[in-house]
Amino acid sequence: MKSMEEMIQAAQAAAETIQKQMNDTQSKLDGIEVEGVSGGGLVRIKCSAKGRVIGVAIDDSLLTPAEKPILEDLIAAAYNDARAKADRVASDELAKAQQGMGLPPGFKLPF
């Protein structure tokens, strides 16, 4: 039978392993790119799966003063599209990491 000290050490080791795997997953998310699109492709925003904006591409046809309000709306829509995709990728990657750790789906880690 294991002593209380051995069980505490095992729990600490497990927590350290989980923390490392979560850190690795977070690093991986910053390397995954998603692209948000709006206006039928006139505005594109690339983000990391963590939500960091990598780049913005705007079609030349939108670069007139008269199109400014439309362009602003399209940029916001493209960002929101990219953010939604990033959230889905992040959720999928975190679920994979949790499965790899033997944690039940939906388990909330306190990190």
Image (cartoon, rainbow, N blue to C red):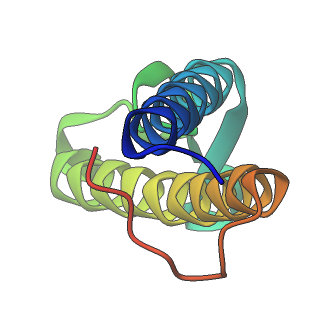
Q: Is residue 23 above or below residue 69?
A: above
Tell me if I can see residue 22 in this picture: yes
At x 79%, y 63%, the residue is 99
Q: Nearer the viewer, residue 37 or 22?
A: 22
From the viewer's perspective, is 101 left or right of 9? right
Relative image position of residue 25 (x, y in whole percent)? 63, 32
Q: Dividing the image into 4 quarters, which one contains the N terminus?
A: bottom right
Tell me if residue 17 comes above or below residue 43 in the rendering: above
Asked whether 96 or 38 is in front, the reply is: 96
Residue 76, how many percent across, how many down? 28, 55
Horizontal arrangement in the rendering, residue 84 relative to residue 76 (left or right): right
Whether residue 109 is situated above or below residue 61 in the rendered picture: below
In the image, taking residue 110 as reference, residue 49 lies left or right, namely right
Residues 37 and 101: in front is 101
Q: How many marks?
A: 0
Which picture quadrant has residue 65? Answer: top left
Q: Which residue is painted at 68% across and 23% down in the image?
A: 28
Q: Residue at x 65, y 82 (%)?
A: 105
